[in-house]
Image: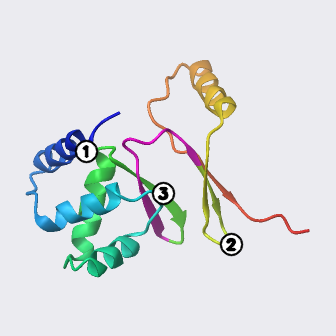
Amino acid sequence: MMNQEDIQKLFVKALQSEGIKLTPQRQAVFSNIMNSEGHRECNDIHQSLIKDGIDVSRATIYRTLDILVNYNLIRKLVIGNDRAKYEKKIGKKHHDHMICIETGNIIEFENEEIEELQEQEAKKHGYQIVKHVHQLFVKPIKK
């Protein structure tokens, strides 16, 4: 498992690869999401930073989140209605998601059988899975 210093180095390297400077605002966005365990929208991150006295624009947050997604440090979950939530990816075990279409709740789950079936299906067609996103959109069962 990577330590905080190694993860920070990956962030700085990602910014350098994009030709973007490490600013206090970008560092704050990075630290905020890396220190969170939840699934959060840009607005949640923005409000949290404001509460901490950090003045940062939503544009900076979105741009930083895009870089973090592109370099596999965080995961972007598209949850519908042009909404997305973000969660840290690095340092977390692989899992999939169920998203309730009524409440917006996100349930993380792991299922080795599903993982194995996906691998078998890819192999059957002559492929190897290098990345996947598995999201189930669900609603409560009415009794």
Residue 56 occupies quadrant: bottom left
Tell me which label, 3 or 2, sits earlier in the chain: 3
The quarter of the rendered structure image containing the N terminus is top left
The answer to the question of whether label 1 and label 2 lie on touching residues, with beta carbons closer than 8 A, is: no
Query: Which residue corresponds to mark 2?
Result: 102
* C-alpha separation, residue under disc 1 versus residue under disc 2: 36 Å
The quarter of the rendered structure image containing the C terminus is bottom right
Type of the residue with mark 1: Gln
Type of the residue with mark 3: Leu
Type of the residue with mark 2: Glu
* C-alpha separation, residue under disc 3 versus residue under disc 2: 16 Å
Give coordinates of residue 70: x percent, y percent.
30, 48
Q: What stretch is highlighted in magenta?
A: 82-96
Which residue shows up at 20% across the image and 76% down it? 54
Q: Is mark 2 on a helix, strand or loop?
A: loop
Which residue shows up at 63% across the image and 26% down it? 116
Which is more foreground, mark 3 or mark 1? 1
Query: Which residue corresponds to mark 3?
Result: 77
